[in-house]
Amino acid sequence: MKKNVLRVEGISVSYGPIQALDDVSIEVDEGEIVSLVGANGAGKTSLLRAIMGLQKVHTGRIVFMGNDITNTSTDKVAGSGIGLIPEGHLVFSTMTVLENLQVGGYHYPQEVSSSLESVFESFPVLYKRRNQIAGTLSGGEQQMLSIGRTLMSKPKLLMADEPSLGLAPKVISEIFNILRDLNEKGYPILLAEQNAKKALEFGDHAYVMETGRVLFQGPAKELMGNPKVRHAYLGGNV
Amino acid sequence: MSPVIYYFLSFTAINILMCWAFYLPYRVGQLHHLVVSCMMASAYFSGYAARQWSWPFALTLLVGTAIGMLICLLPSFAIGDAPCFTVVIVGLTVLFIMKTAIENTRALGGTLGFFGIPQVNNLLLLAYLCLAVAGLLIYRIDNSRLGRAASMVFVDRDAASALGVDVKRLGMLFQIIAGGLAGLAGSLYAFLIGSLFPEFFNLGVIGTLMCMLFAGGHSTMWGVVISVPVFEGLHLILPTAVASWLQVIYAVTLIVVILVLPGGLITKKMLVKVGERFRARPQTVSIKGGIKE
Amino acid sequence: MEIFVAQLLNGLSLGSIYVLLVLGFNLMLVVAKIIQFAYPHLVVLSMYVCWGMLKYTNNMFLVVLASIVSCVIVNVAIEPIFRALSKKHGLDINVSFVVSISIALLITDVMSHALNYGFPIAFPTDWVGKSVLNFGLITFSVGQAYALIGGIAAVALFFYLLYRTRQGRVFRALSENSVLASIIGIPVVKTRILSYAIAGLLGGVTAVLFARLLGSASPSLGDFVAMKVVAVSILAGLGNLKGGLVCGLLLGIAESLAMGYLPGSWSNAIAFMMILIIMLIKPEGLFGIQI
């Protein structure tokens, strides 16, 4: 039996009168890749934001490593070990690559140098560009920096929000390879991805979301074979 | 009429005018402190013209208003669409420059003050007449396409200009009208009070006016009509020991109001609700032949 | 030529005071996203604290400590007002401006009512000190030397803190994108409070240097300095720290040169005239807004 890392129990979120999430429950187990699939506006980002404490949760509970983190402030959620790789390869664009990584290790000031070493090991390109201003990196490099910065905070769970958005196909597969490697190193990953095919191939377990609800869930391979899912998200005859 | 009531009524009229002068540019998100300079210039001009040149009241009032508009016209070419903080600093610097100039001008009484402005019959009545005319003007502007454009600019400047609002011209127009209102207020101030002191026109006046505007509600012109008499009345009722701390009271009120009642006492929403209650039901429009798909 | 050199030195020492004030002001602007118009008023309040302390003790260390502690306490005490404000209005800079102007009025009114009966205060003559350099009629006093040297040291420390330390990186990260900063685990509220504290610390030091430079203070000093500080910060581009450095020094020099060649009672008006002209030519500032 695998240990449970993150458990979301029936949460609802609304932006004013608009219901963004309605009774959503998901689980992420140790060493697992969980994919959230759904069109734009299905609630994937809202779910990640709610877990992160960026969005107020009205009902339901979010439990991380056995602790209730519902409506905890974002910095505490991050400090407790959830690392979000935000949408749109966000970096601190006026700071250097090195500074971006250093600031990522806010909660572990003593271990910054050792974490830096391991990040530079996995991303040699970041080492090469360590003194460059982050805003001048290419999109793919910024995404790597964003991932590296998240790793600096020693997360126990990685959440990636649309990591492929706005990147070239070749770079996308590179980013997915990086995420795969990280998973093999032991990081559980919660991935929100619009590209259903990619997400289902990549994940062990998947949730299909639509208009703030979970429609289908199950092992990713099974969902791939589900005719309804195939019809709605994989363009019928894939 | 007892002097207390006379001063209450005079200051109420002047402050409502000045609050409206603040209100108009704030419709497009600018705190136009320059209007206090307009008021000061116009007050000193009116006083001087009436005493030294014996100008008639009506002419002085007109020229005073024109001076206010002129003072706002020239900088408005540069700051018509400037960000709020730039407009504030321009206003404050002009005020201090003007104050220094007047303090160093012997003919205007310097720091000692300017006295002996001739009295005018039925002045209070005339002042409230001016107030009514100014109110009508602002009401017309508020309910025209200019007012609607201003509301749009207040919410989102870029969106408004993308929709074809000329933000700069709108800002200039409001600034100039505000200058005119302040000029009028200054002229009336000179005649109503009869003496002028440069120390009166300082940051304190700006704080007082901002407090009155924000407490009354900065989204409609009616808020100040209620808040100004209340604050002026408060001024009279409070014992002298407390009243000397009036600036502190204004400052604290302003902070509390902004924190607790962000829209002020009277908001646009409230007016809309009141309007709906009094207005007749909208007529149902019938289209001959129904609506074709 | 002698007058020119002397006024240049005067201008540098005055300018370094402006630079310190603009730095503290800009730190709160970029980290907490507020326009703290009342910041110079707090510094003037701390000058009053120095003056009060000097009545009881001549110990320089104690006076500086009192100045710093008072400035930090008052500045941090103001923070909850702005935090409540940003909860109610979002990060609306204009509203923070209105609130800070009323705080400024409050401080000014307290100073003009309750402290020294509203009269200007004068620091002891040895506080300003004798002149160390003489240029004919114009002298360079110990106080000015302190202002210049202390100013340079404080600015250097400030930039070291901001660009070379862990806390400085956190400030810069928060100023660039507060949501991203919280996502990577930076405690936003705590960091904001810290920025107020550091601005207060800077303000306390500035108060001592300013007192030694001027030798006097009055309730209205805060208004004059606040307008110059905000103006410099706008000219430099709101939140632009390095621009503030340049513009603050330039204002100090320009003001001193104008004072050296023009009649005295107009000196503030001349400074404001320069500010006004540049502001009308460049309403968005010279180096671009960075917030």
Image (cartoon, rainbow, N blue to C red):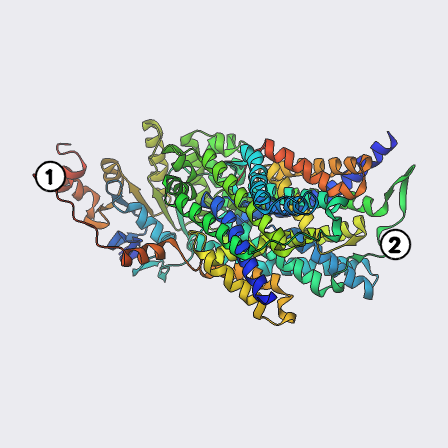
Q: Residue A142 appears in which quarter of the rendering? A: top left
What x and y, as percent, mark residue A99?
54, 40
Front-most of residues C279 and A237: C279
Q: Which residue is mark 2?
A: C126
Chain letter of disc 1 in the image:
B
* Residue type of the residue flagged with mark 1: Ile
Comparing marks 1 and 2, which lies closer to the viewer?
Answer: 1
Residue at (49, 44) in percent of width and height: B25
What x and y, as percent, mark residue B228?
51, 59
Left or right placement of residue A202 versus residue B145 in this view: left
Q: Residue C77 appears in which quarter of the rendering? A: bottom right
Q: Which residue is mark 1?
A: B291
Chain letter of disc 2 in the image:
C
Badges 1 and 2: C-beta atoms under 8 Å apart?
no
Label 2, residues with CA under 10 Å away: few <14, some 14-19, many ≥20: few
* Residue type of the residue flagged with mark 2: Asp
Q: Is residue B6 above or below residue C202?
A: below
Query: Marks 1/2: CA distance?
Result: 91 Å
Residue C171 visible in the current orientation:
no
What x and y, as percent, mark residue B239?
62, 72
Q: Which structural element holds mark 1?
A: loop
Left or right placement of residue B24 versus residue A56 in this view: right
Front-most of residues C258 and C135: C258
